């Protein structure tokens, strides 16, 4: 039985063959910006961040939409991301579904998330769905988005998904899961077998980064919301053949630099936009406004699970 917001639909399964596909291409620099959540200021900041990079690719790996609950805002989000490779997240997967199967938001929340929070997420997605249905040709916007992208950075294979290597909305690349030694061994073995040097994910709203001798996995948390205490900016993953001077933390995987960069968007403009769409007492306001305004209580070091070091900027 499918439980709205809790269950992971069977068509979210990511098969091994998806990770054996031919690469989209080869770049010197890859940005992974999952969890934009419709924040237009984050997309504007992302464009500025990547403008100076050579031979770069930007991947929005799902949940690009969330707070943009009007047709106008939805289209605006798409326009701001028109030059990027866009993957499916659970938000988009449930928007484009022809027949409602009762999955709600499709987040597949674990038991540690309260039922009240799950219910609010289902309500948020329902409002977004109503706007999406009013768009002429809306399904065409999302119809061809893949669940996985394989790219080469330098000469190394990098895999990108929204959740984990098993499911579109999987939680096995959450901070808690990646702290487990059994999961670390499983992931390292799988990546070695697939010839993957780095796996980049999002979905869980909490950043995590782990590197070992031959590989790394990095979860950027949220590009469109604050992630760490005292930092009112989003977070994006950067994987490249050379380091970035503004990296917040960094690890190495083979010859690649794997980094988290702050996405410093216009904080006040985002709050103003959010408040226009989600007034006091609305499901998104209750679930997210405090984080948007004040950030979380997480320290940067909480995300560093091994093989990554915080960068010191003078």
Image (spheres, rainbow, N blue to C red):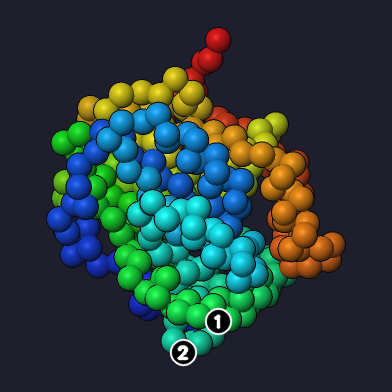
- Asked whether residue 38 is in view, the answer is yes
Q: Earlier in the sequence, mark 2 or mark 1?
A: 2
In depth, the one of 37 and 307 nearer the eye is 37
Q: Where residue 284 appears, x then y in whole percent? A: 72, 63
Camera-near label (2 vs 1) is: 1
Q: Where residue 254 appears, x then y in whole percent? A: 22, 30
What residue sits 32% from the left and 43% below the top? Answer: 57
What residue sits 49% from the left and 87% below the top? Answer: 101
Q: Where residue 247 appears, x then y in whole percent? A: 47, 26
In depth, the one of 160 and 176 nearer the eye is 160
- Asked whether residue 222 is in view, the answer is no
Distance, label 2 to label 1, CA atoms, is: 12 Å
- Above-or-below relation of 259 to 31: above
Q: Quadrant of the C terminus?
A: top right
- To which quarter of the image does residue 45 belong? top right
Q: Where residue 125 appears, x then y in whole percent? A: 61, 72
Q: How many marks?
A: 2
- Above-or-below relation of 130 to 147: below
Identify the residue position indicated by label 1 in the image.
Answer: 133
SS class, disc 2: loop
Identify the residue position indicated by label 2 in the image.
Answer: 99
């Amino acid at each position: 039985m499918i439980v709205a917001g809790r269950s992971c639909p069977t068509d979210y399964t990511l098969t091994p063959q998806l990770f054996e596909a031919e690469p989209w291409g080869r770049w010197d620099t890859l940005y992974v910006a999952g969890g934009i959540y419709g924040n237009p200021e984050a997309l504007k900041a992302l464009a500025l961040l990547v403008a100076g990079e050579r031979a770069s690719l930007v991947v929005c790996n799902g949940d690009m939409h969330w707070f943009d609950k009007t047709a106008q805002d939805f289209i605006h989000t798409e326009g701001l991301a028109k030059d990027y490779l866009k993957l499916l997240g659970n938000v988009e997967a449930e928007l484009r579904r022809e027949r409602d199967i009762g999955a709600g938001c499709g987040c597949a929340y674990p038991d540690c998330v309260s039922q009240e929070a799950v219910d609010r997420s289902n309500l948020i997605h329902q409002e977004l769905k109503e706007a999406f249905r009013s768009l002429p040709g809306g399904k065409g916007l999302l119809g061809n988005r893949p669940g996985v992208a394989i790219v080469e950075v330098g000469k190394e294979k990098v895999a990108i998904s929204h959740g984990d290597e098993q499911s579109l909305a999987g939680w096995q690349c959450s901070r808690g899961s990646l702290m487990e030694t059994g999961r670390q061994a499983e992931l390292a073995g799988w990546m070695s077998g697939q010839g993957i040097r780095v796996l980049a994910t999002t979905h869980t709203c909490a950043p995590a980064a782990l590197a070992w001798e031959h590989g790394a996995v990095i979860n950027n948390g949220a590009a469109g919301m604050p992630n760490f205490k005292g930092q009112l900016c989003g977070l994006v993953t950067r994987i490249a053949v050379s380091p970035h001077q503004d990296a917040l933390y960094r690890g190495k995987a083979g010859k690649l630099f794997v980094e988290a960069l702050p996405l410093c968007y216009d904080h006040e403009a985002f709050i103003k936009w959010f408040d226009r769409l989600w007034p006091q007492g609305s499901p998104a306001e209750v679930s997210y406004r405090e984080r948007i305004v004040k950030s979380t209580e997480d320290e940067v070091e909480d995300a560093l699970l091994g093989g990554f070091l915080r960068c010191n900027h003078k």
